[in-house]
Amino acid sequence: MNNNDILRRIRYALDLNDKQMTEAFAHGGTSTEASQVRAWMGKEEDEHAQTCTDDTLGDFLDGLIIAKRGPRKAGGPPPVRDPVLTNNAVLKKLRIALTYHEDAMLRTIHAGGLAISRGELTALFRKPNHKHYRECGDQLLRNFLQGLTQTLRVAPKA
């Protein structure tokens, strides 16, 4: 999955408007305007679409954590971000922002059409050099984001 697609899916799942998106970017350290956010939301074939970099998506996810949970406690070291944003890091940042525990993560992934075990889930959040580490593939991240949409944007029953 590319960063623009991840950004679009998160925005839709969490039902964020332009103002909330720019605020999340600002919390993460990227100053942007609504027009720039809309350019990142565009599909690749749109003429005004722009590519969202790993740094930009990382700033958005960090800002989303701050917007949802508040700023870090004073005295703690700032988080160190890898230059390459992996699917594992995206999943971990979303888990932190939404304060999801294992059960909520498993339910969300299952709602997206994929069933994984607790062991498989915990392997996604281990350090890359751990012997039980597992890379998060595009399909798993896509299923999580789809499940997030299914659980957070439930259509009202008629």
Image: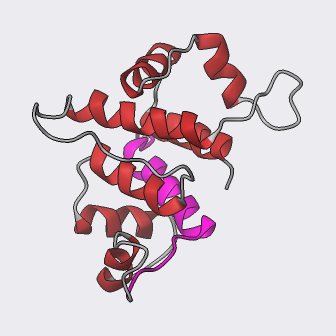
Whether the magenta-drawn stretch holds residue 138 is answered as yes
Give 56 or 129, whichever is nearer the viewer.
129
Residue 12 visible, this angle: no
**Residue in the image at 86% along x and 29% along y:** 46
Residue 20, quarter of picture: top left
Magenta residues span 132-156
Where on the picture, by quarter, is residue 55?
top right
User: Is any part of residue 85 visible from this angle?
Assistant: yes
At x 30%, y 44%, the residue is 79
Q: Magenta stretch: residue 111 in it?
A: no
Figure quadrant of the N terminus: bottom right
Horizontal side of residue 115 vs 67, given as left or right: right
Q: Nearer the viewer, residue 84 or 155?
A: 84
Residue drawn 25% across the image and 68% down it: 102
| Residue 57 percent across, percent down from the top left | 54, 38
User: How many numbered marks are there?
Assistant: 0
Q: Position of residue 91 (x, y in %)?
A: 43, 57
State the residue at coordinates (36%, 47%).
Answer: 80
The relative height of residue 154 versus residue 124 in the rendered view (above or below) is above
Where is residue 18? Give x, y as percent: 52, 16
Colour scheme employed for the rendering of this structure: secondary structure
| Residue 117 placement, left or right of 103 | right
Examine the rendered structure and indicate whether residue 121 appears above or below residue 27: below
Quadrant where the image shows the C terminus: top left
What main secondary structure does the magenta stretch of the protein show? helix
Picture coordinates of residue 101, whole percent (x, y): 22, 61
